[in-house]
Image (cartoon, rainbow, N blue to C red):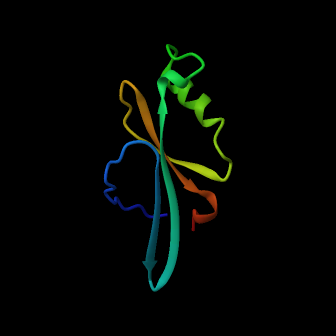
Amino acid sequence: MTHIAIPIPTAPGKQDINIEVTINNQKQSLHYKVELFYWDDCQNPRGHRADCISEMLSHQDPNWMLYYIGAPTEQFVPITFVEKRDFKIK
């Protein structure tokens, strides 16, 4: 799949993003969500952050696929998911 970057306005908390694209006269709808995962929600908040992310992702809805892990802050890490039914690699 080819990738393009689309700036999304920053908003606090969870974001639901629906995008409709037309490529060679074929329309496709994509549904993304951005969630903020807070370090304090980890079972071991003082542990390694990669382990914390792995733990938090293990509880996610299986209908969504990890798409992108954003730049972490001291409080949270933003993580983008794409709905699996929309994401087809060709």
Residue at image point 35% right, 47% down: 11
Let me know if residue 88 appears in the view.
no
Residue 75 in which image quadrant: top left
Q: Residue furthest front?
A: 12
User: Which residue, as the protein is rendered here, is positioned at the far top?
Assistant: 46
Q: In the displayed structure, would residue 57 be above or below residue 83?
A: above
Residue drawn at x 36%, y 24% as measured from the top left: 74
Q: Nearer the viewer, residue 16 or 69?
A: 16
Judging depth in this view, the residue of 85 and 89 nearest the camera is 85
* Vertical side of 8 occupied by 19: above or below: below
The quadrant where residue 8 appears: bottom left
- Image quarter in which the C terminus is found: bottom right
Residue 31 place in picture, x, y as percent: 52, 61
> Is residue 30 at all visible to an observer of this figure?
yes
Is 74 placed left or right of 30 in the picture? Answer: left
The residue drawn where x is 61% and y is 28% is 55
Describe residue 31's horizontal placement relative to residue 23 as left or right: right
Considering every residue shown, the one lying at the far bottom of the view is 25
> What is the count of numbered marks?
0
Q: Position of residue 69 (x, y in %)?
A: 45, 41
Instruction: State the image quarter where residue 9 is shown.
Output: bottom left
As drawn, is 75 to the left or to the right of 57?
A: left
Q: Where is residue 50? Give x, y as percent.
A: 51, 26
Say which residue appears at 59% left-offset and 32% top-offset: 56
